[in-house]
Image (cartoon, rainbow, N blue to C red):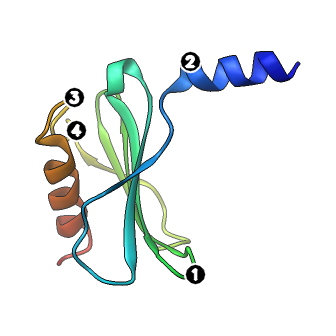
């Protein structure tokens, strides 16, 4: 059973990693969930408490956003920033998060 679970997790995307973010005390984390890295979630959290400040989610086509730990997810855009792989994707996600949080 454990082997099945780890295989299912691996097929669903990659593990998470940290994206560049300039505000001390905050961490921007990214994880892929499939569609050739066109399905992904980026979350901005308080580094100490882990409280959610904002979330961007791409469902392979559209961008969805949530502000705050109890915010309701809303459609943000008809397309996702920097779809697919690329060196510009982390910058595009960071800029989209900045716009979401009005920074």
The image quadrant where one finds the N terminus is top right
Residue closest to the eye, 29 or 76? 29
> What residue appears at the point 19 percent right and 76 percent down from the top-left corner?
102
Residue 79, placed above or below residue 100: above
Residue at image mark 3? 85
Pointer 2: residues within 10 angstroms few (<14), some, or many (20+)? few
For label 1, count other residues whose C-alpha is less than 10 Å away and answer few (under 14), some (14-19) or many (20+): few
Q: What whole-number distance in Å separates the C-alpha atoms at marks 2 and 3? A: 17 Å
Residue 29 position in % (x across, y down): 41, 56
Q: Callout 3 environment at 10 Å: few (<14), some (14 to 19), or many (20+)?
A: few
Seen in the picture, residue 31 relative to 34 is either above or below; the reply is below
- Find numbered disc 2 in the image and state the secondary structure of the residue it sits on: helix
Residue 81 placement (x, y as % from top left): 17, 42
Compare marks 1 and 3 and give the one earlier in the sequence.
1
Q: Residue 31: give x, y in percent of width and height.
A: 44, 42
Q: Are marks 4 and 1 in contact (CB under 8 Å)?
A: no
Quarter of the image that includes the C terminus: bottom left
Q: CA distance from mark 2 to mark 4?
A: 22 Å
The answer to whether mark 2 and mark 1 are in CB contact below 8 A is: no
**CB under 8 Å between callouts 3 and 4?**
no
Relative to 61, is 31 on the left or the right?
right
Q: Earlier in the sequence, mark 2 or mark 1?
A: 2
Secondary structure of residue under mark 1: loop
From where the camera sits, is residue 66 visible?
Answer: no
The residue singled out by tag 4 in the image is 80
Answer left or right for 46 relative to 99: right
Q: Residues within 10 Å of mark 4 (few under 14, many from 20)?
A: many
Query: Looking at the rendered structure, which numbered label has been put on residue 11?
Result: 2
> Mark 1 sits on what residue?
49
Q: Residue at x 58, y 23 (%)?
A: 10
Mark-to-mark CA distance, 1 and 3? 31 Å
């Amino acid at each position: 059973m454990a082997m099945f679970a780890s295989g299912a997790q691996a097929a669903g995307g990659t593990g998470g990693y940290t994206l560049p973010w300039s505000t001390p005390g905050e961490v921007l984390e990214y994880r892929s969930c499939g569609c050739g890295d066109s399905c992904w979630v980026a979350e901005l959290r308080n580094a100490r408490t882990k409280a959610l400040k904002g979330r961007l989610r791409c469902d392979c086509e559209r961008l969805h956003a949530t502000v705050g730990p109890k915010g309701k997810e809303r459609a943000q855009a008809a397309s996702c920033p920097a779809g697919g792989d690329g060196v510009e994707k982390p910058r595009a996600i960071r800029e989209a998060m900045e716009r979401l949080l009005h920074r």
